[in-house]
Image (tube, grey):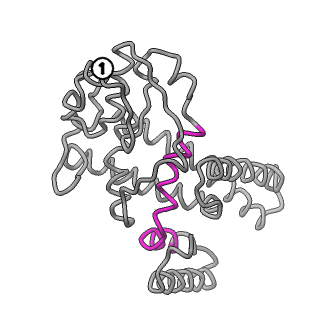
Amino acid sequence: MFEALTPVQLAISAAILAVAYFVRGIAGFGSGLIAVPLLAFVLPFSLVVPLMMYTITSYLPELAVRKIPWASFAAANGQCLAFRRPAYQALGEHSAVRQIVVEDIALGRLTKQAGLRLVMALGNGLIYGRMYHDWRQVREGFAKNILAGHGGQPVFLFISAVFHWLIFLAPWAWLGAGVFSASIPGWPEYPLAMIALGLGSRLLSAAATRHALPDALLMPVSVLLMTVIAAQSVWWQFTQGGPSWKGRVIPSNQTGQDNKKQA
């Protein structure tokens, strides 16, 4: 991960950490509150983009995608879609989803609704793609899709964020609290076990998808960055009716949130 940083980024990161721990030395707390939001602007986006594969390998019911005909079990990755020509034409090709930004999932739903076979497979070592080149592009690209991925419902996105905070952040807070108080129940065995399970699942995903293993150790930072992305998506929804993308505002009914009505 760190080899992806330029000398300027390394210098900025070091300065941020120095100031954060200086504040901690004076106040006794606050290093994370200062460092994490600022480091988000200089850390490589490899802390965020691989979470898409983590979601697929950890949460996606892959057998359900293959076997269950319901459209709600559709999954697809728009970077690489392969169709037999008759099936693609029967779906109406990409013209059928031209008004939907999350068109890969929309095509997957159309596939199931048409009674055709849908399979999602890992293409590691076979296919390479890069959509984003800096943190701003990652933030805006993921924020464009993340609310639609939760049914267009901010409450579902909030529940998802809380779930990941409980799994990947709360154990660290639990572990840290035990340092200052001897009466914390379950300390340190329970928080250490939760940390090991959380990081272990992320390491397994990174190994299976050939991503950098050291990045997996920073999963708590990744969760915080995804929280920033989720907040950006919700902010767009409530202030302008949909996400911004490539200089224009996309109405929420074109992000895939109303895909069931259009499909």
Q: Is residue 143 left or right of residue 203?
A: left
Image quarter of residue 74: top left
* Disc 1 packing (10 Å; few <14; some 14–19; many ≥20): few
How far across and how far down the image is residue 175, in percent? 74, 59
Asked if the magenta segment contains residue 55, the reply would be: yes
Q: Give the residue pinned by disc 1.
A: 86
> In this orientation, which residue lies closer to the viewer: 131 or 185?
131
Which residue is at 32% across, 28% downward? 107
- Locate the C terminus by quadrant: top left
> In this orientation, which residue lies closer to the viewer: 262 or 160?
262
How far across and how far down the image is residue 177, in percent? 72, 62
Q: Which residues are magenta?
A: 34-58
Q: Amino acid at mark 1?
A: Pro
Provide the secondary structure element on which disc 1 rests: helix
Q: Is residue 57 left or right of residue 134?
A: right
Image quarter of residue 96: top left
The rendered magenta stretch, by its main secondary structure, is classed as helix
